[in-house]
Amino acid sequence: MTYSLADDPLVLGGRTFRSRLIVGTGKYSSFAIMREALASSGSEIVTVAVRRVNLTDRSRESLLDYIDTNRFMLLPNTAGCYTAEEAVRAADLGREAGLSNWVKLEVIGDEKTLFPDTEALLAATKVLVKDGFVVLPYTNDDPIMARKLEDAGAAAVMPLGAPIGSGMGIQNPANLRIILESASVPVIVDAGVGTASDAAVAMELGCDAVLMNTGIAGASDPVAMAEAMKKAVEAGRLAFKAGRMAKRLYASASSPSEGVSRK
C-alpha cells in the first residue's frame, strides 16, 4: 500500500489541515512578495502579529489586505509581549477585532535572545485556555515545560529549534525526541529554521509541523524558498512515516554476497 500525505492530515485544535507548514508574515521586503511566498508555501495557516495589524482604521493599507482569508486561516500571535498580562491583552484584542480565537502565544523573557519567559508563558496559557482560546505556545525545548503547557490545556506545544530568526536549525534533537515521546498534543517546531534541510530534520524526528518566518522572508528569493520549505516538510514527514534504516557502525553491502559463487 502506497503512503499518501493526503491521507495523513494535521489535526490541530479540532481542525484538520493538509499542510504541515505554518508560515509567518513579518520581515518581507513588501506585502506583494509576502503574498507570493504564502501562495508558494502551500500553507493553510499564517501567523500575524496583533501589534502589526491596524485594527482601528481599516481604510489604510494593511498586511491583511494581502492575505486571502478564504485560503488561509489567520493565527494571531502575541509577538513583542514581555509579560503574561501584555500577552493576554494582545490575544483579547485580536479576538475582539475578529481575527481569531486561536493564538500563537509568545511571552518573551530576554530582549537579546528572545527566549521565552516560560513561567509567564504558563500563566498566560492558563488564563487564555480558561477564556476559550485555542492556545499554541512558543516555548523552550524543555520537556518539563512542554508537559506543563499541555496539562494547562494548550492545543499544541511549540518548542524552538534555535533562537528566533537565528537560522541555526535544530540544535537539540535529543530534547525534541523526549518531548515527542511524552506529548499527546501536536508538537510544532517554532523558530530557528534556516533552510529546507532544517525543516526536513524536524519532520524526520516526528514533529507534527514546522512554523517559520525568517527562514523564508530572509532568503534571497523568498518565493522559491517557500516552495523549498513546503517540499522539505512533505519529504521529512514521508521519511518519518516510512521509517529510516538502522544506523550501523560498519559497512553493510548493498549487494549481499550470500549464494554467490566465488570461483
Image: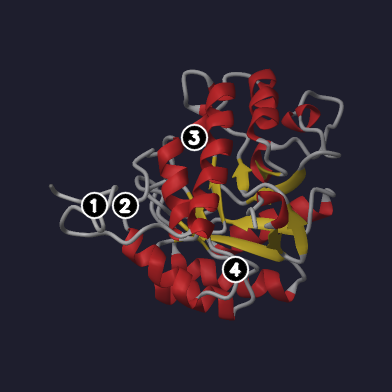
* Structural crowding at the residue carrying mark 4, measured as other residues with C-alpha within 10 Å and reported as few (<14), some (14–19) or many (≥20): many
Q: Which mark is residue 260?
A: 1
Task: Name the residue at the left extreme.
Answer: 263
101 or 255, which lies in front? 255
* Residue 134 horizontal side relative to residue 257, left or right: right
Mark 4 vs mark 3: in front = 3
56 or 102, which lies in front? 102
Distance Cα–Cα, label 1 vs label 4: 67 Å
Residue 168: image location, x then y, percent: 34, 41
Residue indicated by mark 4? 124
Distance Cα–Cα, label 2 vs label 3: 17 Å
Tag 3: residue type? Thr
The earlier-in-sequence mark between 2 and 3 is 2
Q: Residue at x 57, y 30 (%)?
A: 226
> Looking at the image, can residue 142 be seen?
no
Disc 1 + disc 4, Cβ < 8 Å: no
